[in-house]
């Protein structure tokens, strides 16, 4: 038995991986986008945190046609 064989991911694990990868990819640019539109750095952080929370609650993240469009619309 090959101990290094890949173990299939569950749907929840795939979704979690998608969320983490999306946050890594878009965090800096989305943060800048939000900061340019609000007066307070604290408010910008709160908004960004809310965007990530809403993303984490999605059950169909892989079905979103444009994840960047979705993120900016939510922000």
Image: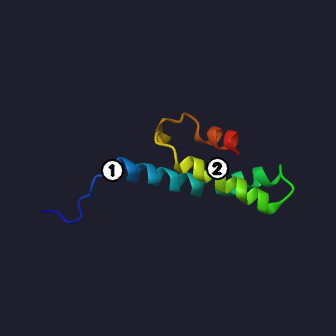
Residue most extreme to the right: 39
Seen from the viewer's position, the closer of residues 22 and 41 is 41
Rendering coords of residue 53 (x, y %): 59, 52
Left or right: residue 16 versus residue 39 is left
Q: Are dots 2 and 1 in contact, CB under 8 Å?
A: no
Residue plotted at (71% across, 53% down): 47
Q: Residue furthest left?
A: 1
The location of residue 74, given as percent across then percent down, is 67, 42
The quadrant of the picture occupied by the N terminus is bottom left
- Label 1 sits on a secondary structure element that is loop
How far separated are the C-alphas under marks 2 and 1? 24 Å
Q: Secondary structure at mark 2?
A: helix
Q: Nearer the viewer, residue 46 or 10?
A: 46
Question: Dot 2, how many residues are within 10 Å of its Cα: few (below 14), some (14-19), or many (20+)?
Answer: some
Counting every numbered tag in the picture gives 2
Instruction: Please give the name of the residue rendered at 56% of the width and 51% of the height, measured from the top-left corner.
Output: 22
Picture coordinates of residue 24 (x, y %)?
A: 58, 58
Q: Residue furthest bottom?
A: 3
The mark found on residue 38 in the picture is none
The C terminus sits in image quarter: top right
* Residue on which disc 1 sits: 10
- Neighbor class of circle 1 (other Cα within 10 Å; few <14, some 14-19, many 20+) is few
Q: Residue at image x 59%, y 47%?
A: 54
**In the figure, is residue 28 to the left or right of 56?**
right
Q: Quadrant of residue 71?
A: top right
Q: Which residue is painted at 53% across and 50% down in the image? A: 56
Q: Is residue 40 left or right of residue 69?
A: right
The answer to whether one can see residue 29 in this image is no
Residue 44 visible within the image: yes
Query: Counting residues from the N terminus, which is met first, the one under dot 2 or under dot 1?
Result: 1
Residue bearing the label numbered 2: 51
């Amino acid at each position: 038995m090959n101990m290094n064989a890949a173990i299939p991911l569950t749907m929840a694990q795939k979704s979690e991986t998608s969320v983490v990868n999306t946050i890594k990819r878009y965090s800096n640019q989305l943060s800048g986008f939000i900061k340019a539109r609000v007066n307070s750095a604290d408010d910008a952080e709160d908004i960004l945190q809310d965007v990530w929370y809403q993303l984490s609650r999605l059950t169909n993240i892989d079905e979103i046609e444009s994840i960047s469009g979705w993120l900016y619309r939510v922000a």
